[in-house]
Amino acid sequence: MHRNTFRAAALLAGVSGVAILAGWAFAGSKGLQFGIVVAVAINGLVYFYGSTAALRAMRARPISEIEQPVLYRIVRELATEARQPMPKVYLSPTASPNAFATGHSPRSAVICCTTGLLRLLSERELRGVIAHELAHVRRRDTLVCSVAATVAAIIGSLTALALLLPFGDSDDDDGPGLLSELLFLMLGPIAAAVIHLGVSRAREHRADTDAARLTGDPIGLASALRRIEVGARTHPLPAERPLLASAHLMIAHPFPDRGMGRLFSAHPPTAERIRRLRALAAEWEMP
């Protein structure tokens, strides 16, 4: 928990420092002032919008217990067993099966599932997924992941500068659009690097183990991961910039393993995660 809090602070400090130094290097004292303004703006965006960026990207909305009684019951039971505050529950109208947690702390945590996930998984498998997300909340993985997602989204949004550049009186809209894509090809790897610096692939293995201990059922989570991976291949998320910046929050990588989707991959191989969970089941002498 303390490690992730430190990593989130270090990531913000590093990005702020780069912005200030870049401003000073390019424009001297005036650039330094501009860099400070940019750094303050980045920190403000992370503080006020960091925990909701992924929810907006996934078009998620809060749901009531009446709408999803089974999901609510599972979240409540597992949160109570883990001695954590009951997180808010959101639903994303997305066919791609996935889930994620976000929030700066356990008291502000949100767990979001897609409609595709709820259609695909059994209750046993869904328990494993929810336990996995609760483990991320407890370890403060959601804090550092939300910070990384917001910073990456800010970097990606700089491509909108192409719309401000003059392209003459031509009615052709390809100029700004083409430049925007070229800018993203340059800035995309930087955004991906921020994510890889901020988050560790080992976090998924730790959350898998914690989830297996909470439910006492590593096979249920292993089965869920297998079905989610197959479902994500059949119904991948579109590789849009806000979604790319939030991909590391998901329980499984939601994009095809090519192009920008591969660049933003921050998950260990699903086969390795399943192997470890099955090894836990064998160690616990479970059927």
Image (tube, rainbow, N blue to C red):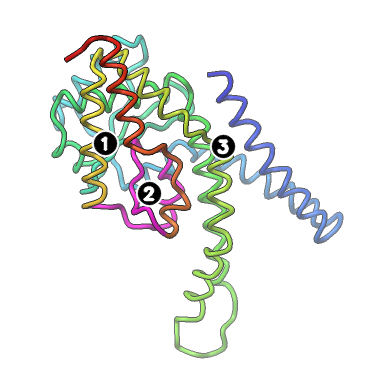
Instruction: Kindly report which numbered mark, 1 or 3, lies closer to the viewer in this rendering.
Output: 3
Q: Which residue is mark 1?
A: 113
Find residue 160 and report its horizontal and vertical position in percent.
53, 65
Q: Mark 1 to mark 3: distance in Å?
A: 24 Å
Given contact means CB atoms under 8 Å apart, are the residues at marks 3 and 2 in contact?
no
Find residue 119 and report its horizontal and vertical position in percent.
13, 39
- Amino acid type at mark 2: Ala
Q: Which residue is mark 3?
A: 198
Q: Earlier in the sequence, mark 3 or mark 2?
A: 2
Classify mark 2: helix, strand or loop: helix
Horizontal side of 175 relative to 83 (left or right) equals: right
- Amino acid type at mark 3: Gly
Q: Which residue is mark 2?
A: 57
Instruction: Kindly report which numbered mark, 3 or 2, lies closer to the viewer in this rendering.
Output: 3
Q: In terms of depth relative to the viewer, which is nearer, 272 or 54? A: 272
Look at 55% across and 43% down and name the residue there: 45
